[in-house]
Image (spheres, helix red, strand yellow):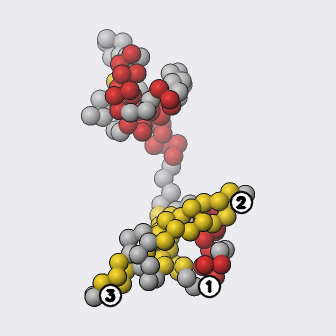
C-alpha cells in the first residue's frame, strides 16, 4: 500500500530542511503556511516517496515534535506497465506515419521518442517545439496531444 503523507511545521510560513537519505542529502521545502488574525496555517510538505518519509520520521526535528504528520492519504498504486503499454501502443497509417494515440502530453511524447526504436537522447528533446520537430522528422504523430 502506498501513502501520501502531509508533514507540517506549526508556526512557520516556510522552512527548508535537509534530511539524510542513505548516503545522500535531500532538501525538503515546507511551504504554504500563513499567520493572520484568523489563526495560523502550518507550513506543509507532502510526499509519497517512502525513502523521504522514513528520512523525515527518523530525523531529530520529527522526534522532537517540530515536524508532525498532518494527514495521511492511502492511494491506489497504478499499474505502470499497463499505462506505459497504452502510451507505447501505435498504429501505422496509410501514409507510413506512425501514430501514438495514447500520448497526451510532452512527457509521454518524450518517453516514446527516447524508447526503442527511436532512441533519441533527452538533450534533443528539451522543449515542445524540439519534440514536435523530431517527431515530424521521424514521421511520428501524437493525435491526442495538442
Separation of residues labelled 1 and 2 (CA atoms): 21 Å
Q: Nearer the viewer, residue 112 or 123?
A: 123
Q: In this figure, which residue is indicated by the disc labeled 1?
A: 64
Q: Nearer the viewer, residue 46 or 140?
A: 46
**Residue 85 % position (x, y):** 48, 37
Q: In this figure, which residue is indicated by the disc labeled 2?
A: 22
Residue at left offset 32%, top offset 87%: 39
Rendering quarter of residue 96: top left
Separation of residues labelled 3 and 1 (CA atoms): 23 Å
**Residue 84 % position (x, y):** 48, 39
**Are the residues flagged by discs 1 and 2 in contact, CB closer than 8 Å?**
no
Rendering quarter of residue 59: bottom right
Task: Please tell me which of labels 1 and 2 falls first in the chain.
Answer: 2
* Quadrant of the image containing the C terminus: top left
Residue at left offset 60%, top offset 71%: 56
Q: In this figure, which residue is indicated by the disc labeled 3?
A: 39
Q: Nearer the viewer, residue 114 or 9?
A: 9
Report helix, strand or loop for mark 2.
Answer: loop
Separation of residues labelled 2 and 3 (CA atoms): 38 Å
Residue at left offset 42%, top offset 69%: 31
Placement of 132 over or under 77, stated as above or below: above
Amino acid at each position: 500500500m502506498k501513502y501520501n503523507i502531509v508533514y507540517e511545521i506549526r508556526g512557520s510560513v516556510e522552512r527548508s530542511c535537509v534530511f539524510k537519505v542513505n548516503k545522500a542529502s535531500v532538501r525538503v521545502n515546507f511551504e504554504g503556511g500563513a499567520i493572520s488574525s484568523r489563526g495560523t496555517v502550518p507550513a506543509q510538505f507532502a510526499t509519497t516517496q517512502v525513502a523521504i518519509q522514513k528520512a523525515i520520521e527518523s530525523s531529530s526535528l520529527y522526534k522532537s515534535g517540530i515536524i508532525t504528520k498532518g494527514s495521511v492519504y492511502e492511494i491506489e498504486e497504478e499499474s505502470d506497465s499497463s499505462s506505459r503499454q497504452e502510451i507505447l501502443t501505435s498504429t501505422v497509417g496509410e501514409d507510413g506515419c506512425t501514430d501514438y494515440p495514447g500520448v497526451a502530453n510532452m512527457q509521454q511524447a518524450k518517453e516514446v521518442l527516447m524508447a526503442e526504436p527511436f532512441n533519441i537522447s533527452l538533450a534533443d528533446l528539451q522543449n515542445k517545439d524540439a519534440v514536435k520537430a523530431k517527431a515530424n522528422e521521424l514521421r511520428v504523430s501524437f493525435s491526442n496531444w495538442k
